[in-house]
Amino acid sequence: MAELGTESKSELTRSSSALARLLNLDNWLVPFCLSDKFKFACRVAISLTIAYLLPMALGWSQPSTAATTVMLIASTGSRRESFAKGTLRVLGTVAGGIIGLMLVGVFAQDRFQYMLAVSVVITIIFYIRSAYLKDPTLFMLTGVMILMMYNGGDAEGAFLYGLDRTFMTIFGVVIYTVVGVFLFPPKVERNLQQLATALTERQQALFNRISGNPQTENHTHHEVENPNTPEQETEEDDAPAPTIAELSQQLFQAQQDFESRYHTINADCSEISAYKKEWDGTVALYKKITEILLFAAKEHSRSGGHPSEFIHDFEMLREQIIAMFERVPTAWKTQHTKAPEDFEPIEYDKEKLEQAGHLYRGEAISSAFLLRQLRERLAQLHSCISSIDSVTGRIQFDLPSLKALPDFNWWDAENAKTAVKVFLTYWCSALFWIYFNPPGGYNFIVFSTLFVSILSYLPLHPFMLFILFTLGFAFSVPAYVFILPQLTLGSELAAFIFIYTFIGFYIFKGPITIFFLLGMFTLGINNEMVYHFGITMMIVSLFYLVVITVVFSYYFPFSARPEHLMLVFRERFFRHAEGIIRLQQNGIRSTRHKIELGWRVATMKVALKKMMVWRTKVNTQYYAPVTIEALTAFTERCDVFHHHLMTLLQAEKTIAGNPLLSRVRDKYKDRIIPVLAKSLISYQDTAIPTDSNNSEKANIDGLENNGQFVGVRKEYTDLEHQLDDYFSTVEIENYSNSDIAGFYIFLNLKKNIFESLIACKQAHGDVSWATLSDKKF
C-alpha cells in the first residue's frame, strides 16, 4: 500500500506539472507563443505598413522609398531598437544625402567623372560598413543615399529628387525606430540575468570538477547505491561525466555569450546606463572568476597529490565556495547593497609542506592562491549584483575595469574583398545600363551594388536567391491579378501589406528576406494604381537581372564557395595562432609587438567564427570522403585550442613581471608548441623535428600507441622535467606565493595548449583537405 501510495503521489505530481505547463501562456500556440520571432515580424510588418500607407494618405511621393528603408534596416540591422540608433541612422541618411547632392552638383555635366567619384566613395563607405562591429545600417543608409541621388542621368530636377528621397528615407527610419521602441520592447535586464545565471552554473560545474578529490569521488561512487531503485537508471546517469576540457569550453562560450550580449545593448540602453558602473563591475567580476577557474583547470595533478592533503579544512573551504556560487543568482532579487564579507586566511599544513617535494609545495601554494582569489571575487560579485537597481547605496570597493570592445575590425580580408566586389559590380552594372538600357534603368545599378554589398560572403547558396524571389513573385502575381483590384479601403490594403511582410520576416531571417519581399515591390502599390501586366513584368525582369548579378559576384572576382573558404579560414586561423604563440614566447615588449598581437588575435577570432559558420555549408556530395561530422569535429577542436590560447594571454596580464617566469623564458625555450602550430598552417602532411639528438623526427600525422603522438609527447614531457628540475633548485622562500602560483598557472596553461593542439592535429588528419582544394562545379 505504501508503494502504491508513493506511485499515486508521483503520478499526481507529474500530472500537476503537465497541467501547469499547459496553462502557461508561453506554451500556447496562439499567437505563435508570442516568441521573439513573432514579436520581431509583427514590429517590422507594422512599420512597413505605416511607411507605405501614411505617405499615401498625405499625398507624398515615393512611399516605396520609406518602405524599402524599413525592409533594409529590418533585414540587416539588430532586432533591438532605441532612439539613439534611430538618431544615428537619420544622421547617416542626411550625411549620405549631402554627399550625394554634392557629387551631383560637382559632376552634373560629366557622367563618367560622376560615376567614378560615386564608385570610389561607396566602395569606401561599404568597406567601413563591413568593418563596423555594431549596427551596420548607419553606414548602409549613407551608401544607399549616395547611390539614389542620381536621377537616372537627368540633371534637371536632381536636387528636388534627392531631397524627396532623403526625406522619405528619414521618414522610414523614424517609423521603424518608434515602432521598435514602443511595441514589444525586450526585457533587457531579464535577458542579461538569464545569461548570467547560466554562466554561474557553468562556473560552478567546472569548480566542482577541478576541486573534487578523484579518489574520494570514485570510492563514494562505488560504495553508495540505492537498494530501493536498483534498475531505475536514466540516460543522464549512464552518460559519461563531461571532461574538464569540455566544461572549460562550455564556460568559455557562456562567458562570451554574456559579454557580447552586454556590449551589444550597453551603448544605447537606458536600463543599463542608469547603473552602468555596477553593470560594468558585474561583467568584469564574472570575467575574473572565469579566468581564475580556467587558470586552475587541468585533468591531472602533476605532483600526483591533491590540495586537500596540505590545506587545512579544504573540504569546508570547498563547500563554502560552492555555497557562494549558489547564492549568486539570489543577489539579483535583492534591493539593497551588501558589503563583501571578510574571510579567515587559508592555512597550510606547514609540517607536510616542509617535508614534501617542490611539486607538492608549488601546487599547494598555487591552489590556495587561486581559492583565495576565487572566494574574494565571488563575495565582490554578490555585493556588486545586489547594488544594481538599489536605492540604498553604491559600491564601496574598487572594481576591476571592463575593457571596451573595438568598434571596427579593419583587418578582415573578406571586408576588403567585399569592397572590391562593390566597385566592380557598380561598373559592370553601369556599363550594362549604358549599352543595353535594362529594365529599371539606373535602379539596376543601385540595387545590384546594394545587394552585392549586403549579401557578400553570406553562408547562402546563390540558387536560393532565385528560389526566394520566384516564391515572392508567385505570391505577388496572383495578388496583382485577383486581390489588389478588389481592395477599395485603406484598411484592406493595410491588412494585405501587413500579412505579406509578416510572412516574410516570420519564415525567413537575415538579408535573404529581402528577396522574398521584392515580390511585393513588383506590385507598384501607390495611390493611383495602373494595372498593366507589362509594367509588372518589367519590374520582375529588373530584379531577376539583379539576382543574376549577385550570383555572378558569388564567383567573381573572389570565390565564396564554402569549400574554398574553409581552406582559407583554416590556413588563416593557424597562421595567426602561430604568430601569437611566437610573440608570447619571445615576450611582448615593444609597441609594434602589441599592435601585431592585437591584429593577430582579432583576425584569428574572426577566422574561427567563419569556419564554424561555413563548415556545414560544404556540399560533401561532391567532395567525398569529406564529411560534415569531420569538419565539425575539427572546428570544435580549434575552438578549444583558441580558448586555451586566449586564457594564456589573459594570464600574461596577471603574471607579467614574474621573476620565476622571466628566468625560465630566458633559459628554456619551448620549441614544440610553436612548430606544432606551424605544421597546421599547411593542409599537406608535415613532420615535426625534435631536439632529441638533433636527428630524430616525430611524424605528428602518424598515430602511434592508441592514437597518442609518442615522439612529440616525449619531447614535451622532457621539457616539463627540465622545468621541474629547475624549480627544485630555486629557493622557494625567496619568492612570494603569487610568483609561485603564477609559475604553476603558466605551466598548466601551456600544457592545455599543447594537448589542444594535439587534438587539432588528430582532427585535422580526419579531413581530406586536398579534396576540398579540387575545382568542382
Image (cartoon, grey):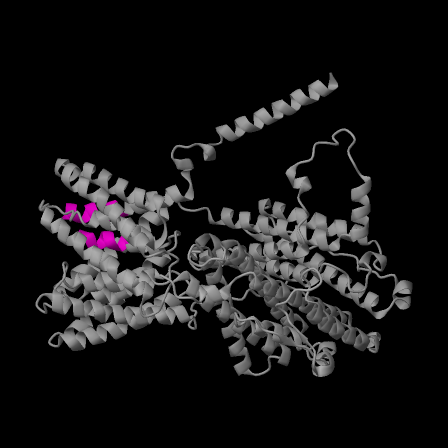
Q: Which of the 4 quarters of the picture holds residue 86?
A: bottom left
Please provide the residue range marked out in magenta. Answer: 48-71
- State whether residue 640 is above or below residue 410: above
Q: Which residue occupies 26% across, 71% down? A: 424
Q: Which residue occupies 15% across, 59% down? A: 440
- State whether residue 475 is above or below residue 427: above
Left or right of 369, for residue 52: left
Left or right of 760, for residue 222: right
> Within the magenta stretch, is there residue 61?
yes
> Within the magenta stretch, is there residue 62?
yes
Instruction: Between residue 219 and residue 10, name the one nearer to us.
Output: 219
Q: Please, what is the dominant secondary structure of the magenta stretch?
A: helix
Instruction: Between residue 300 and residue 161, name the one nearer to us.
Output: 300
Instruction: Between residue 403 and residue 575, name the one nearer to us.
Output: 575
Whether residue 631 is visible: yes
Whether residue 91 is visible: no
Q: Which residue occupies 19% across, 62% down? A: 444
Q: Position of residue 13 (x, y in %)?
A: 62, 26
- State whether residue 532 is above or below residue 73: above
Numbered marks: total: 0
Which quarter of the image is occupied by the C terminus? bottom left
Q: Which of the 4 quarters of the picture holds residue 36?
A: top left
Q: Position of residue 651 (x, y in %)?
A: 65, 69
Q: Position of residue 482 (x, y in %)?
A: 15, 37
